[in-house]
Image (cartoon, grey):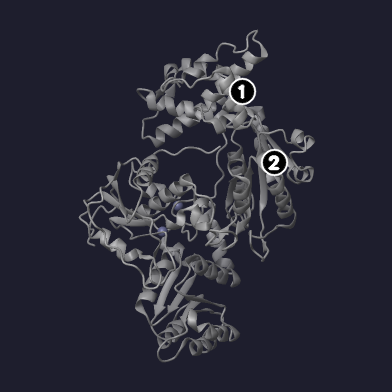
């Protein structure tokens, strides 16, 4: 960004305070947040500066020697009626701040400032002024950084996914993404968000499966100071953080019955109340949920609320597992190769035909994530930036032979669990997620089948 | 500070704990940092007594005073010194700060006090505290390496005044900020699924 561009998109703030330390600290702080800042040490100087320059917001200390903040406020209103005035007050003199509000000040802040409060106040003041020009410029500059992530895959299955992403991103519809662990559900969610009208606002990710019930509630809806023992400070919820943007609820099937009720209410009303709070906060968000579970079966079994299911199941994107689209394996492998070589500052490189053969005939139970791990590992252990078949993890070689040949169901299960565990580097949570069972079940099966983690280096 | 040329070079990150600080936590920070940056990260022995100043009536450590103490230490060129503390920090005009640093400066200071879920009444989660701590340290080092705040909410250089935004930011510099860092500073990033 050149300095000329910056100037046109910045809001200008004038700080009026007789204490140089307040002037300096505030000026530095606002400047680092991208504002144009000027300061004045007295009311007189402030009047002169406002008459000469263009300011959007003036932060005025109520208590100043000579002409005080209240008088300055009324004089400023004559000189520059469009100027938004925010009063600075010590907490002891809130009375005069109220007087200032009556006289047309936008709001007031008390010293010392809560950085979060001050930042919100100023942003609110700017939005209030609806500086459309600034917003347009800001959005243009954000366009460059809000780009959609690249989704690699030219198989019919992935092309269908991309078509769906394209179609649904133009709407504000709720999306349910389904697919096995490691297929890239978050990446698809990010692509939808980045192509949508909400792309200038955040996409907030909540992994519902990773949090205990009580914490999930606080995470989703936030809590007020003093909401429960130990809550000495308020905590904003993910829905609040997603205002204007998208909330991505991953592993939606893991949400408890009680939180399902709350969730349904928030999705319907678009209003959240922090735990222990009184004030409903209205939020504007789009929901993208994801699961690798059979939600229909969960509804049937009474584990997932049917009304919530229908709320979420408006538009479904199903990501096929990697084994169903072998033509994508090679493209993805090259993509990761290029990415990691670039990141590791290695020269441009290739994959040997034998390695391609091995990659193409493996079943990839851990999907794209497993493939990425394999390529990264091959680059790390390999001599040059060439991926050779011997650089690939042992398990990738192993599965070129059919695993299930004439085996009993138990043997098939054992082999499958082992291959998933290996694919996930024995991460129990991820493996359980990929297998669609809980961690306890997986531990039991590991015990029953006497499965053991291979020594380091074996993959 | 008279830092004349090549302000954006960094050969190593040195971590110094200030005040009571569990050894284990400091080591976890080093491990976390080492995952994100490619230059060596080292934990300094607490041989130097760092003076802290308490802000009147606030039971908080004066962050800028602490930063000045760190900057006054003999810091070799190419070293970025990171002071970490469990003390809650603030400066006179703000009720709290997560960290402080100066553009192009040799040192930064970061407090983990308000990065801990416990502070908000949530169950302790050392992994979350570590992730936020590493993110804040990288943000402040970013300033030391001349980076300014970024408009991209998912970038480490986004200005955050609350822990929720720290989480939202994630752990990487955006495509506009990353190239401004010295070559070879960052470790290769991973994709998310
Ligand atoms: Zn900063
Ligand atoms: Zn950035």
Residue tagged by mark 2? A176
User: Residue sitting at 45 percent across and 31 percent down?
Assistant: A338
Question: Above or below — where is A339 with respect to A64?
Answer: above
User: Residue sitting at 35 percent across and 22 percent down?
Assistant: A383
Instruction: Report the disc number at residue A323.
Output: 1
The N terminus of chain B - image quarter:
bottom left
In percent of width and height, residue A127 lies at 59, 68
Res. A185 in view: yes
In percent of width and height, residue A294 lies at 72, 33
Instruction: Report the disc number at residue A220.
Output: none
Q: Nearer the viewer, residue A191 or A184?
A: A184
Q: How many labels were placed on the picture?
A: 2
Callout 2: SS = strand
Quadrant assignment, res B30: top left
Chain on which label 1 sits: A
Residue at the extreme bottom of the image, as rendered = A66
């Amino acid at each position: 960004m050149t300095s000329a561009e910056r100037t046109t998109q910045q809001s200008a703030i004038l700080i009026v305070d007789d204490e140089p330390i307040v002037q300096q600290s505030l000026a530095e702080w606002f400047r680092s947040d991208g504002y144009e800042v000027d300061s004045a040490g007295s009311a007189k100087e402030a009047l002169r500066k406002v008459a000469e320059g263009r300011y959007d917001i003036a932060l005025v200390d109520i208590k100043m020697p000579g002409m005080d903040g209240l008088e300055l406020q009324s004089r400023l209103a004559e000189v520059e009626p469009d100027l938004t005035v925010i009063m600075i007050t010590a907490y002891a003199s809130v009375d005069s701040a109220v007087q200032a509000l009556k006289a047309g000040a936008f709001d007031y802040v008390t010293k010392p400032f809560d950085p979060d409060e001050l930042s919100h106040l100023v942003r609110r003041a700017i939005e209030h002024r609806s500086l459309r020009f600034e917003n347009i410029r800001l959005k243009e500059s954000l366009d460059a950084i809000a780009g959609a992530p690249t989704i690699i895959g030219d198989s019919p299955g992935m092309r269908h996914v991309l078509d769906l992403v394209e179609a649904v991103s133009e709407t504000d519809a709720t999306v349910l993404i389904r697919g096995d662990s490691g297929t890239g559900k978050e990446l698809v969610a990010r692509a939808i968000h980045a192509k949508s009208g909400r792309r200038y606002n955040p996409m907030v990710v909540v992994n519902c499966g990773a949090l205990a019930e009580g914490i999930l509630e606080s995470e989703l809806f936030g809590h007020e100071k003093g909401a429960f023992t130990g809550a000495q400070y308020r905590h904003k919820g993910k829905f609040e953080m997603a205002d204007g943007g998208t909330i991505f609820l991953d592993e939606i099937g893991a949400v408890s019955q009680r939180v399902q009720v709350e969730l349904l209410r928030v999705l319907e009303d678009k209003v959240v109340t922090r735990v222990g709070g009184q004030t409903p906060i209205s939020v504007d968000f789009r929901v993208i949920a994801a699961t690798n579970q059979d939600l229909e079966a969960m509804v049937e079994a009474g584990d997932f609320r049917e009304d919530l299911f229908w709320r979420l199941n408006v538009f479904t994107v199903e990501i096929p597992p990697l084994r169903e689209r072998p033509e994508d394996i090679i493209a993805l492998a090259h993509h990761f190769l290029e990415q990691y070589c670039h990141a590791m500052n290695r020269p441009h490189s290739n994959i040997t035909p034998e390695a391609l053969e091995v990659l193409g005939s493996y079943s990839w139970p851990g999907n794209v994530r497993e493939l990425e791990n394999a390529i990264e590992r091959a680059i790390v252990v390999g001599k040059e930036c060439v991926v050779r078949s011997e650089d690939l993890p042992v398990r990738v070689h192993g599965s070129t032979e059919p695993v299930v040949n004439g085996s009993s169901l138990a043997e098939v299960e054992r082999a499958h669990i082992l291959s998933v565990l290996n694919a996930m580097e024995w991460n129990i949570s991820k493996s359980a997620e990929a297998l669609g069972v809980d961690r306890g079940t997986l531990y039991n099966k590991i015990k029953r089948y006497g499965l053991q983690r291979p020594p380091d280096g074996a993959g | 500070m008279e830092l004349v040329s090549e302000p954006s070079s960094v050969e190593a990150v040195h971590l110094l704990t200030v005040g009571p600080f569990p050894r284990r936590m400091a080591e976890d920070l080093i491990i976390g940092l080492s995952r994100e940056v490619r230059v060596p990260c080292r934990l300094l022995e607490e041989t130097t007594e760092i003076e802290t100043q308490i802000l009147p009536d606030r039971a908080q450590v004066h962050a800028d005073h602490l930063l000045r103490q760190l900057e006054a230490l003999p810091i070799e060129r190419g070293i970025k010194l990171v002071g970490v503390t469990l003390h809650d920090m603030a400066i006179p005009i703000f009720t709290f700060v997560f960290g402080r640093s100066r553009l192009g400066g040799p040192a930064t200071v970061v407090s983990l006090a308000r990065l801990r879920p416990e502070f908000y009444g949530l169950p302790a989660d050392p992994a979350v505290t570590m992730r936020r701590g590493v993110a804040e340290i990288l943000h402040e080092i970013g300033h030391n390496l001349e980076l300014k705040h970024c408009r991209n909410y998912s970038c480490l250089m986004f200005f955050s005044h609350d822990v929720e935004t720290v989480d939202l930011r994630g752990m990487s510099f955006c495509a506009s900020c990353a190239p401004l860092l010295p070559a070879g500073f960052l470790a290769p990033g991973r994709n998310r699924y």
